[in-house]
Amino acid sequence: MEMRDKLRKWREDNHRNSEQIVDVGEELINEHASKLGDDIWIIYEQVMIAALDCSRDDLAWTCLQELKRQFPGSQRVKRLAGMRLEALEKYEDASKQYDSILQDDPTNTAARKRKISILKAQGKSAEAIRELNEYLEQFVGDQEAWHELSELYINEHDYGKAAFCLEELMMTNPHNHLYCEQYAEVKYTQGGLENLELSRKYFAQALKLNNRNMRALFGLYMSASHIAASPKVNATVKKANVKYATWATNQINRAYQLAGRGTKENKCSVKAVEEMLESITMS
Amino acid sequence: MSSSLPWPLSMHLLMLRPKRNGRWWRRSLWRSVERVMGEVELSCLAYVKMYLHACLFPRCSVNGLLLSSSPAGGAVCVTDCVPLLHTHLPLAPITQLALTQVDVWCAQTQQRIVGYYQANACVSDSSPTPCALKIADKIAEQCNNAVLLMIDGGKMSPDYRVPPIVMYERKDTRWTLKDKHTIMLRQWEETRDIASQLLDSGDHSLLVDFDSHLDDITRDWTNQKLNAKIAELVSPANALPPGGGTVSIVTFTWSSSTARGRQQNINSMSINHMLLENSQEWRNWLRDPT
């Protein structure tokens, strides 16, 4: 059944398209529950989380009741109950729920991460960062947590620490162009000649891994231009960076021309890019 | 121009406006207020697109630029907006890129960047973040009356009858809350209804912000299609008068559904014939005091 496959795909890819999940999942549960077999439980969980995301408390409650009935005393279901309390902004009660899970099972990572999410939802970023750091000391391999920590640091404008988190991620995922590109963006934001050079290198790396990453292409262009324009660099470095920037310009122009061939609505964007590239002169 | 006269003096004079459309307009000053420096008008198009941007990415902080097609000097008319980012707002490269591209596009289309808007992911906190202040500062360097607009996520539900926005202006290098009496939205109810209608019909997914454009460069961040859709829904009274207009506006405070604030009804006489209707009312809103 294709609805089931859709849900499985979204589950595996960790998509947060909650409105769609609720639409498909609700229909599946209401109409075809008998044909799902044991899959139904994991679908209940998926739909419940999506329902919380869309403020569908009614649907979330139904799913939770079914799961409670089938798996009484399960930690996983307890976590879902906690998430429902979070969605209702009953953070104290949710926290107590997670604490009780952790009492029974101190290594339960899900409950710990939910507690950190509560801090984030309440706007207590400093505490969330502290807790997440403690968590990562114990569970060094948790990619999701490293990424979340990098996001928290970026929002706090602590770019050095954000870069550190992204470095961890790049080490364990050397083929992921998005981590390279994000790292390069953080380095660019930090500023200073060294950081700009690093950012250019990592934008280039991201492009090597995925030559259609427009952010990386623009990033390469901008970092190379800034380095070339800097008074602190010698002539050879300047020349090299002008070369990189020119190459990037050509790639950008080509990409936009290929894109612009389709519709006339993005002629505005194409023209803007052309003018921008012309107007940013390089010394 | 009568706007250069001090208020008490002008109260005692009947001013004659120059010939317009073959008729002399007499404006009795006790019934109208001069256009004051520091007034900001937000068009339906700008509001609807900002609102849809925030709705399209409800779990992220979003930001964008406010544009004006009217000439500099006098009140600020925000006629359009460009949604920018929904990821990594504090990071520099894409923001710089977007600002440059929007700048170029504005030069091509006779518009200016006059402000910045942001909606925070955290619904309970609608105060400007450091990166919002930084970008707004940058805009203020080029535009004297630049405004910083924060969307208050907590007030975006249909139950709320006031626009869910908080506006700041720059006074002595600091961003301070704007006097609510100087903020105007024409035909607020119609604007609000258009926003809800587009949200319900799913048309908000037509909105393209700069981030989405970078994910797929065939998508148009100037949102011509969505602009056209909104324009279809807007009544002539809600549209901007040609050339921004030197419209004489009277503002009156509007009580919210919980009866906060005063209500005064003042009929205004509008010079601009497009908007001239006997029952024409101009409204601004109360910033929620809580």
Image (spheres, grey):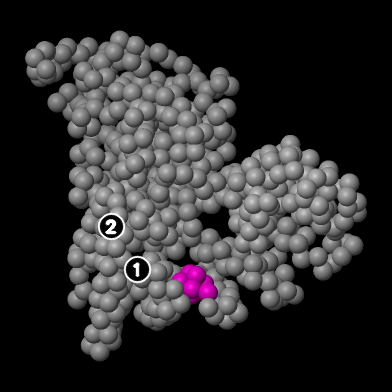
The location of residue A268, given as percent across then percent down, is 26, 52
Could you tell me which chain the residue with mark 1 belongs to? A
Taking the image as drawn, is residue B120 in sight? no
Span shown in magenta: A176-183
Which residue is label 2 attached to? A260
Q: Where is residue A19, by image quadrant?
A: top right
Q: Quadrant of the C terminus of chain B?
A: top right
Q: CA distance from mark 2 to mark 1?
A: 17 Å
Reply above or below: B201 against B253. below
**Which labelled disc corresponds to residue A87?**
none
Q: Name the kind of residue labelled 2 in the image.
A: Gly
Q: Name the kind of residue labelled 1 in the image.
A: Phe
Q: Residue at x 46, y 41 (%)?
A: B204
Say which label, 2 or 1, has the lower sequence index. 1
Q: Residue at x 27, y 29 (%)?
A: B240
Q: Which of the two marks, 2 or 1, is nearer to us in this view?
A: 2
The location of residue A45, given as percent across then percent down, is 75, 51
Which residue is label 1 attached to? A218
Q: Secondary structure at mark 2?
A: helix
Q: Where is residue B135, by image quadrant?
A: bottom left
Q: Residue at x 54, y 80 (%)?
A: A174
